[in-house]
Image: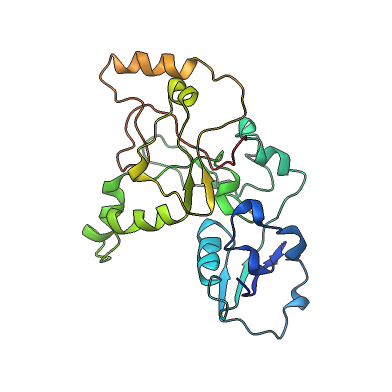
Amino acid sequence: MSAKSLMLGAAVLVGSALALPYEQIDIQSSLLTNPADVAGKHFDYIIAGGGLTGLTAAARLSEVPEISVLVIESGFFESDQGPIIEDLNAYGHIFGSTVDWAIETDVQEINNLSQTVRSGHGLGGSTLVNGGTWTRPHKVQLDSWETVFGNKGWNWNNLTHYMSMAERARLPNQKQIDAGHYFNVSCHGLNGTVNVGPRDTGASYSPLMKALMGTVEQLGVPTQQDLNCGDPHGVSMFPNDVNTDQ
C-alpha cells in the first residue's frame, strides 16, 4: 500500500503501515506532530479521530494506492503510560490517567448516582483501556440496528462478515482448552491483520476460572462457550488481541 494516511494532533501517522499486520508496522518512524507538515496538502479523505473505527476506516481506504487519507487524533501515541497499556495484567491501572477520557454521566435515576465511562484518549481509542479483550455484542443488539432503527443491512449476519475480515485468530491448544478456553472456528476470521487468541506467555493458568465454571455450571449457567458467536451469556474465557507468545 502506497497511500498516504496521516495521524495529526499529538500524533500524525504516515500511512503505508495501516493495512499491514501489526508486527510489520513501523508506526513510530511515520509519526508527525506538527500541523505545518500537512498544511496545503490535498487528501481524498479526512477522518476525525484515530480510535478503533477511525483507524479501521483509514486502513481499508488506504488499501487503494490512489487514495490518500488524513486521520486527525488529539491523543497520544505511546508515552510513560505505554508499558501499562501493553501489560494486560495491569488492566485498570490506566483508568484516570491522561489516556482515559473518564466521562462522567448524568445522575442516573436507578441509583441517583453518576457513572464513569472509560474511553481511551489516543491512537487506538478505547482499545487502549479495554484490557485487550476481543468480544462481540449480542446478535440481538446488532439486529436491532435494522429491525428497530431501520438501518437496512446493518445486522449480525452482515456485520460479522467484516469483523471476521479484521481478525487473524489462533485456535487454543490443549493446555488452553483445559484451562477453559474454547473457540468456534466458524465465528472467527483467520486471515485478517489483528492477531487474536488466548494469552500464550507459557505461564500456568490459574485454576480459579475452571473452578468458577464448574460452580456456575451446576446452577445451569452456560460455560466454556465462544463469546464471539452472538450469544455472550454465561462464563467463559475470552480471547485477547495479542501476538503469539504474549
| In the image, residue 184 above or below residue 98 | above
What residue is at 29 percent from the left and 47 percent from the top?
A: 139
Q: Quadrant of residue 46?
A: bottom right
| In the image, residue 83 above or below residue 162 | above
Position of 209 with respect to 1 (left or right) is left
Tell me residue 37's x, y (percent): 77, 76
Q: Nearer the viewer, residue 157 or 1?
A: 1
Tell me residue 89's x, y (percent): 62, 30
Q: Nearer the viewer, residue 55 or 73?
A: 55
Q: Quadrant of the N terminus?
A: bottom right
Q: Nearer the viewer, residue 41 or 157?
A: 157
Position of 149 with respect to 54 (left or right) is left
Position of 62 with respect to 236 (left or right) is right
What colour-coding does the image apply? Answer: rainbow
Q: Quadrant of residue 203?
A: top right
| In the image, residue 197 above or below residue 105 | above
| In the image, residue 8 above or below residue 165 | below
What residue is at 66 percent from the left and 35 percent from the top?
A: 87
Q: Quadrant of residue 9?
A: bottom right
Tell me residue 34's x, y (percent): 78, 71
Q: Quadrant of the C terminus?
A: top right
What residue is at 72 percent from the left and 78 percent from the top?
A: 38
Q: How many marks?
A: 0
Q: Nearer the viewer, residue 34 or 42?
A: 42
The answer, for residue 137, to whether it is visible in the render is no
The answer, for residue 229, to whether it is visible in the render is yes
Tell me residue 13's x, y (percent): 68, 65
